[in-house]
Image (cartoon, helix red, strand yellow):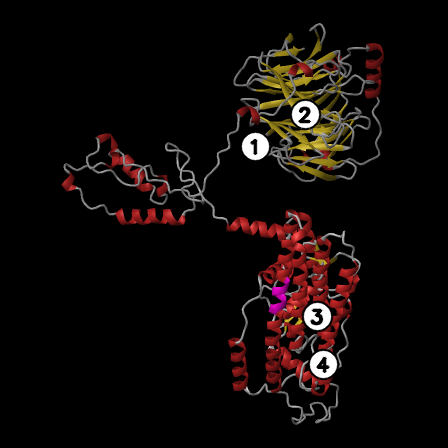
Amino acid sequence: MANKKLKRKIIEEKEIKVDEKPKEQSVETEEDEDYESDKDLLVEIDNEDQQENDENEEEDDSDSDDILSFESFKSDYEENENDFNSENDEEEQLEFEDSSVEDELTTEELESLKKKQEEKQKIKELVEFRKKERVEQKETSKLIMDTLRQPEDETYLAMRENSVQSKSLPGPSNLSDEIEESDKKKFVEYEDDGDTSDEEDIRNTVGNIPLHWYDEYKHIGYDWEGRKIMKPPAKDQLDVFLRKMEDPDFWRTVKDPQTGQDVVLSEEDIQLIKLIKKQRAPDQNFDAYEPWVEWFTSEVEKFPIRNIPDSKQSFLPSKVEKKKIGRLVHSLKMGWMKTKAEQEKIDAEKKIPKFYMLWDSDTGREKMRRIHDHVTAPKRALPGHAESYNPPSEYLFNEKELQDWQNLSDEPHKRKLHFIPQKYKSLRQVPYYQNYIRERFIRCLDLYLCPRAKRMKATVQPEDLIPKLPSSKDLQPFPTTQSMIYRGHNDIVRTMSIEPKGQYFVTGSDDKTIKIWEIATGRCIKTINTKGVVRSVAWCPNQKISLIAVASDKRLLLINPHVGDIKLISKKTDDILAEAPVSEEIENERIKTAVQWSAEIDKDEYKDGVRIVINHFQEIAQVTWHAKGDYFATVMPNGLSRSVLVHQLSKRRSQTSFSKSHGMVQCVLFHPIKPCLFVASQQHIRIYDLVKQEMIKKLMPSCKWISKMAIHPKGDNLLVSTYDKKVMWFDLDLSTKPYQTLKLHASAVRSVAYHSRYPLFASGSDDRGVIVCHGMVYNDLLQNALIVPLKRLEFHEKVSDYGIFEVLFHTTQPWLFSSGSDYTVRLYT
């Protein structure tokens, strides 16, 4: 009745409005109002139905224990049929009014009017469909009510379902289909993909937080890639109304606030809700009255079941999780961990089939015959003439070749042939080959056991192996030409030494004489007979005295040459040597038997300049001075533990350096700065500290026989010559092994020398050659020495397979002296 009164009231108000409008108003305006009024009428009818449904629900409160109360559970199912008749009368009246105006319209107005009438017709069809559907919904709701009241009767439930399916109406109109399709497009983000997992079903990855936080924003969260998830468009009342009419599961559909999905409750969910509403246990099989077992109170325990204190580790953050997070952060920084989009792209590329070209061209080789690189097995060598059944006679073994072949039975890989060639008259006489099966077996082993790989040959140019050295033109000055020849000795000139000022030099020879020469003029100033083969001479480096030490057989002669400043230096030297110091120390018997100082000199020798004679018990091979000129050392290779003696000129005493022998000593040197002594045996060089009296270092030249050595003026580098054609440079701060080994000579190297001022060194050999090299030593300890060969000087003549015995640099000028077996001394400038 309320609906009828409302509809009549709307129609009367509409008639009054039509009468009050002026006649000049167009028919189009009336049509618009009629159209709008029809829409309003439908909305009001729906609202009225909603109110009646609410009243019906209140009347059914008595049965609320047995019926589920969802939103609009029984709405729009209890309308009176009289409402439909009143609506039909109203529509007929409106149609009559529309037809009375059509005659006064133009063509364009008629077309617009027709369009509106078509829209109205669609709405009318929809209303008629809703009327029919309401009747079916009422029957369906009654069926559901009966089903809920009798859930245990399965036969009754099946009969009801079949009756509903037999009475179902056809699908909705085209308008409702379009609306439903638009709804599906809007909610593609929340389409159900069949996943029933609680966690994976959550499309909104914002987390389990209150969604009212996003009320002021247009989005409701973020997806896995961090992009915003926009809010779905809200449904209007017409959409809700259409869904009520069309969806039979609307009464059991609820909206999930987390995902925005419409979730249809299953029969199990409905049954669970019913049990919870009745305040029963959710599990039907749960027995609330089963016998209770007293697990902890049945037996009295003396001690607590668990009284373990919490460990300290339980209060600390997990180290395993920290490592995992560190690995993830590192993989993110390095780009190893891919985002979901990147991973999907990679997976898509893997799924794409890959195609390979069978060949590049008709004439080109097959590059992609196999995807993986395959190295074919090497083929066996083709048989030669020796494997013929009738080989030529030169391929057959003689007795010696056969014996050599049999002797290599322990090393068969060294044989040129793995068989003995045989000769037969015809092919049918060839017997069975005994090693056939064995050779086939070894071949099979090689094929599947021996690994095969492609070996990349490195093509190195010979120029790349040669170190890049500066040009010799940039390293001048150094000796390049022979300037002077000093002739006068009648035998091999073994040794020589230069005055500290560089004006004179002295030479010693096998003709038992020493000669003093003036360098600039080449004039022999003095010749002194030593009564023995002179093996070593050394000019005292102290410029305040004029003294030469000469090693002649077993005697060491200290000679005043009387050259230079004769009045001052030579006289002062004689005065110093004439006074014999008195020593209170008791001389050791071991030293007394090895060496004796003698000041009693023959008149002839005294006239020649001999001032002191030191007699040794063995032949002296070398004599060398200390840098200060007070100490000098002598070497006797056959002296065993007393082979090295150190003498002091100021105190006229001698001392042995070692208590036992370390091999045959070849030569010794004093360090130019430090109190150290270098002792070279045949294969090793030992460095001793004279203050601490201990060995500091042992150098390993890796040679067969050391001939001579020279020390750099700064004392950090050592040059060693050997009889096995080598010249070795030692960096004492770097290693005990040679820094660089020079193999520039073809015969034994007998002498080496450093220049005291220029970065030069030289070596002389029995191959008649003198090689001058540039040897720069830097102050920077991180930079190694630079060694550059400069010039080979070859002017001496070879006598009895001997060449050059000694080389020596000038003290101030870049000049070089060499003494050889051809009785001459040559000067190179």
The residue beneath circle 1 is 704
* Magenta span contains residue 496: no
Depth check, mark 2 against mark 3: the one in front is: 3
> Looking at the rendered structure, which numbered label has been put on residue 57?
4
Secondary structure character of the magenta stretch overall: helix
| Mark 3 neighbour density, 10 Å: few (under 14) some (14–19) many (20 or more) | some
Q: Nearer the viewer, residue 266 or 806?
A: 266
The answer to whether one can see residue 485 in this image is no
Q: Residue 139: x and y, percent?
A: 59, 79
Q: Where is residue 811 in the image (x, y as percent from the top left)?
A: 74, 16
Range of residues picked out in magenta: 123-129
Which one is in front in this view, the residue at disc 1 or the one at disc 4?
Answer: 4
Q: Which amino acid does label 2 sit on?
A: Leu
Image-quadrant location for residue 542? top right
- Compared to residue 13, the image places residue 806 above or below, namely above
Query: Disc 3 on helix, strand or loop?
Result: helix
Q: What residue type is labelled 4?
A: Glu
For the residues labelled 1 and 3, the Cα–Cα distance comes to 121 Å
Residue to which mark 3 is pinned: 46
Q: Nearer the viewer, mark 3 or mark 4?
A: 3
Residue that appears at 62% across and 61% down: 121
Per the image, the residue denoted by label 2 is 786
Q: What element carries label 1?
A: loop
Q: Comparing marks 4 and 2, which lies closer to the viewer?
A: 4
Tell us which disc is closer to us: 2 or 1: 2
